[in-house]
Amino acid sequence: MSTDRLFSRESIIILGMHRSGTSAMSGVLARLGVQPPKTLIQPASDNPSGFWESKEIVAYHERLLASIGSAWSDWSEIDRDWSGAEPASGQTSLSALIDQEFGDASLFFVKDPRMCRLTDVWLRVLTEKEIEAKAIMPIRHPTEVARSLQARNRFDMTRSYLIWLRHVLDAEHGTREIPRVVVQYPKLMASWRVEVERIAGRLSLEWPNPPAQAGPDIDQFLDAELRHHSEGFEPSGHGQLDGWVRQAHELLQQIGQKDEDSAMQRLDDIRSEFNRVTSTFAQAFREAEAVHVDAMAKLRKQLKVKSAASSPAPVEIVAPLEKKLVEMESRMRQDQDAYLARVSELAESMRTSTEQHHAVLATLAGELRAKSEQVQALESQLRTQRDQLVALRRGFEQSTGLYQQESIRRKAINVELEKAVLNQKATIHAHEEKLRDASSETDRFKRQLDELKRTHASSSAMLRQEIARQKRAAENLAHEVDTLRDSKGWKFLGLLRRVVGRGEPQRTQSVLASDAATIRDSGLFDRQWYLDRYPDVVKSGMDPVEHYLRYGAEESRNPSAAFDTGSYLERNPDVWFAGLNPLMHYIDTGIREGGGCASGDVSQKQGTGG
């Protein structure tokens, strides 16, 4: 049953076997402010603190169980095909009973041990009414329950255990889809505050009447006399039944714990085995019991009639009837014991068979696990191979696509190459035509070249003669220049120029500064080169540019590797005669007139200025 829908109200269904502490749990809830039914069954000697059960709802449950051939003391499985019989015509429905007993209460509780076997009916009706169901399952030691039933109903241990087992197994199985909590009766009696806090947490509840406020009333209610018996398992004499009861009691305490799933699985196993056994003998047991009950009822009726006819009744009339009634009760118990003994034998046989089946199943399970592991390994290999196949297919598709693209590209290239080949052939043909034309032209050029060679040979002879003549003239001129430089007149003129230059009034300091700035900006004066070349300038402490302007040029010193002062004056003797600085003349005039310098084109050999 899904719990995902929204509900407008809440209900607590208390599901526990008779004499298991359901009344104590109900009394605590009532004092915490949870709404009880309106038509409560009155307290009795076997439950002086109250049953907290609705008379109308209990009657409804009895009618419902009777309609399917069952009763509260029946321990057989209810027919699985039964889906909840409606009451007979004229009887109130369960939905109407809920409205009648609880009205529009937002939180109420309902309690009747018979509900353990009718959870499907309750959960269906509550869901239809949009009331959320939350279950509290009180459990008490099965021996205490059996002793209580023995005192109240004169049931033996075996029958009490059978009824207990049926109630707790059906209640646990029927509440797996709703919020629920198991409450142990001893813990409720010993520390109810801890238990109600745990219940509220597990079921997401808020108590209308806080525990702190309801505490004194609850303490008084949970009097020690409510606990009629003490724990201590008493065997029934039927080993399989005792084993089921012990295990079920232990497993129920694990509900809500971390190992809950394992506990529910084992409870399912017990329930399945229990159902197989009871399906064989339960109907026959019920029929035999009905015969005995009917016969005993008739005897009691006869005894009552005869006792009323003669008061006091004669001993000879009453004694035989009472003896016969006792004999029938004894015979009925003997028949019950025989049936239960047969049930126990069958259960033991089934247990042995089940253990054998479990051993076979364990072996098969081991083989199945081994096969499963092999299958998983094969599936893993298959997945790996499938992934590899997918990768290969993708790679093949990509390769095919690339191959197709490459094929298209290559076809396009081939077309272009064919066009290029055709064009190349045409070009070659044209070049061949030109080559043929060039061959004839080459022949003509060869003839002209031969003619030119003959002419050149004649011209070369004449040119060599002229070069020899010019060389002799240059040598004569160089000799005359050397003679002139060595003459006293040339040296006198140089001395005169320096004297005249030093005495000129216009060579003021401002002019020197202006010329020095011009030379520095020209890039034709290499300061470091000048100092490295002429160490005496370093010793004089004079600025290199100023030294060149005053003395260096007159002494044919070079301002840098890019300018040869002497060569410039040889090519421009008018500069020397005019007493001008050769580098300044080159900067001011020589560059514009195209005058060179001995060290090459100064535009390509710029020095570092001072």
Image (cartoon, rainbow, N blue to C red):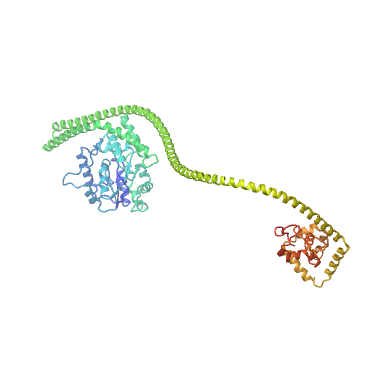
Residue sitting farthest toward the bottom:
505
Q: Is residue 445 left or right of residue 35?
A: right
> In the figure, 7 relative to 281: above or below?
below
169, above or below 579, in the image: above
Q: Position of residue 150 (x, y in %)?
A: 27, 36
Is there any visible trace of residue 312 in the rendered image? Answer: no
Work out which quarter of the rendered image holds the N terminus and state it: top left
Q: Position of residue 453 (x, y in %)?
A: 69, 48
Look at the image and tell me whether residue 427 can be seen: yes
Instruction: State the image quarter where residue 58 is shown.
Output: top left
Identify the image quadrant of residue 575. Answer: bottom right
**Where is residue 137 shown, x and y percent of the image?**
32, 43
Give residue 411's quadrant in the image: top left
- The one of 83 and 376 positioned closer to us in this rendering: 376
> Is residue 496 or residue 174 the one in the foreground?
496
Give x and y (percent) for residue 363.
37, 27
Q: Residue furthest left?
A: 309
Instruction: Please tell me which residue is depicted at 17% across the width and 44% down the height of the picture.
Output: 88
Q: Tell me: 10 left or right of 550.
A: left
Residues 149 and 375: in front is 375
The foreground one among 70 and 133 is 133
Q: Residue at x 22, y 51 (%)?
A: 100
Q: Which quadrant of the rendered structure holds the C terminus? A: bottom right
Above or below, 398 relative to 361? below
State how many labels appear. Answer: 0
